[in-house]
Amino acid sequence: MKKENVIEADQLTKTFGDFTAVNAISFEVKKGEIFGFLGANGAGKTTAMKMLIGISKPSSGTAKVAGFDVYSQTEFIKKNIGYMSQKFALYDDLTVKENITFFGGIYGLSRKKIKEKRAQLISELGLEDISNKLVGSLPLGWKQKLSFSVSLLHEPKIVFLDEPTGGVDPITRRHFWEMIYKAADQGTTIFVTTHYMDEAEYCDRVSIMVEGKIEALDTPKKLKEQFKVESMNDVFLKLARNIEAP
Amino acid sequence: MSISLSNISKSYKKVKAVQDISFDVNPGELFGLIGPDGAGKTTIFRILTTLLIPDEGTAKVAGFDIVADYKAIRSSVGYMPGRFSLYQDLTVEENLSFFATIFGTTIEENYDLIEDIYVQIAPFKNRRAGKLSGGMKQKLALCCALIHKPKVLFLDEPTTGVDPVSRKEFWEMLKRLQKKGITILVSTPYMDEAALCDRIALIQNGAILDIDTPKAIVSKFPKTIYNVGANNMYKLIQSLQDYEHLYSVFPFGEFVHYTDQRESFEIAELKSYLEKAGLTDIHIEVAQANIEDAFMELAK
């Protein structure tokens, strides 16, 4: 039972002048997989992610995302993925309803479909009482849950989540992960970065980038065995430490 | 007391940012304010650093009243705000001498205090602060907050968005500063960092949930926690949520933390329930509660 690959990167590289931000990374992500994309600040995660979502042209190497080429078919990629970051998620000055309608429109959904999705989403998240409130007035955790749901509006094959839970309280953080499990269970591929190492354990597979290269890639269980440690936090510390030594 | 708050409240229009908060920090203590975004941590910092006047209550820092003696407080505390607030267009060295000059001192005078942090950014001393990486900005900001040898150091979320390696290094730096006799109040949304503090206040929605040593907070957890694992995490959580004796279930790393409503609990019974639900590779064992479990229980 071999599942299809929805991301395939081969020797993907990005240089800025004589600095190599992403150095020949190769990996595959399967349909419905929760793939954790980890690395220290400045390791090249954001640059790699930008190439995969079609907003930064690689310097060399190849990659396909949702079956489309990252050089020539970036518009198709954008239609087939969802993206959510911690920094920019929703418009604070629009209400919950307006945000959903706006993003539905951006993704090119029909009015009927938007209406249907809006009702479904508001009821699933239990936002009935506050659907006419400005998003700016909501607690961060609610915003992030709403933002994740909005990134799924157009039923993308892959969702890219860039530190979705930073600063979110522990209970909401776990509700957020339950939403991720649910989406993955329904076949959506999840590509997620995080600095919470307990969240790395929730992923099916995890890659760890160090100075532009993928230094480790496996299931959390196998990585812990490989590095003979108890937690993903220790795997992370060990990898980054080893690199610092001359 | 190095820091002492009694019955402090502050509202922004209708929003009650902090409500009737009281706590004391002992001299030389490393004290953590632990809570998510919006808990009121930054408001507390701004009140204690005299940038904001509370609606109610009184507070003292390093023996001075936050309203009457605000000038004395400003010269005896160091403050590293959550948002990078150095001059982006000045170099590393220029920023540092600027802060030293403002506080009527020189880099040389207190160099011993910042030396082991500054040497790490010294190779970039001619680089503009705006061009530094996140980790280096954080180190420079800490140097600038320390250059006048403050008695009390306020650090508002110094490690938010910082990777685990840099976070670990940062905490090692704090421990060394503490040994030099500086009282430190630090806030963080990362519960694992709570264990590194002498005492912590868990805070949510402007109110304190508990104040104690990390060990004592964990030991007060009222239930036995079980690590439960199975072949499918999503189905496992769903099945447990439907279990009639469930008290709580939360994902925790590779397992979920499960607590039961009953006093006496049979592992075998839960195992057979999960097997009937179609799960395999079931694993159940007693686990240790941690700060995050305690926080979630108190926040309920």
Image (cartoon, helix red, strand yellow):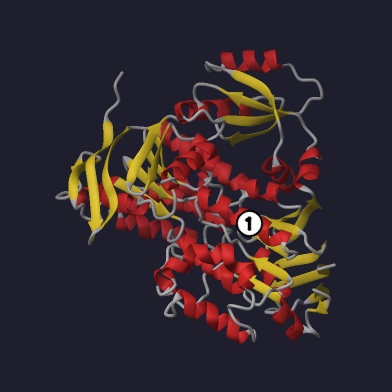
Question: How many residues crowd mark 1 within 10 Å: few (<14), some (14–19), many (20+)?
Answer: many
User: Image point 70% across, 46% down: which residue?
Assistant: B195
User: Looking at the rendering, which quadrant does residue A41 occupy?
Assistant: bottom left
Q: Is residue B70 left or right of residue A89?
A: right
Helix, strand or loop under label 1:
strand
> Is residue A244 placed above or below B86 in the rendered structure?
above
Q: Nearer the viewer, residue A239 or B180?
A: B180
Mark 1 = which residue? B188
Locate the N terminus of chain A and report the quarter of the image it occupies. Answer: top left
User: Looking at the rendering, which quadrant does residue B9 occupy?
Assistant: bottom right
Q: Is residue A83 left or right of residue A11?
A: right
Q: Please state the horizontal and vertical placement of residue B116, each as a whole percent of the image.
A: 57, 62
Q: Indicate the chain on which mark 1 is placed.
A: B
Q: Nearer the viewer, residue A124 or B154?
A: B154
Q: Which three-letter amino acid code belongs to the residue tagged 1?
A: Thr
> Is residue B101 placed above or below A93 in the rendered structure?
below
From this viewpoint, is residue B233 visible?
yes
User: Image point 51% across, 64% down: which residue?
Assistant: B119
> Is residue A246 placed above or below B81 in the rendered structure?
above
Q: Please state the horizontal and vertical placement of residue B76, each as a whole percent of the image.
A: 73, 78
Q: Please state the horizontal and vertical placement of residue A188, each as a whole percent of the image.
A: 37, 37
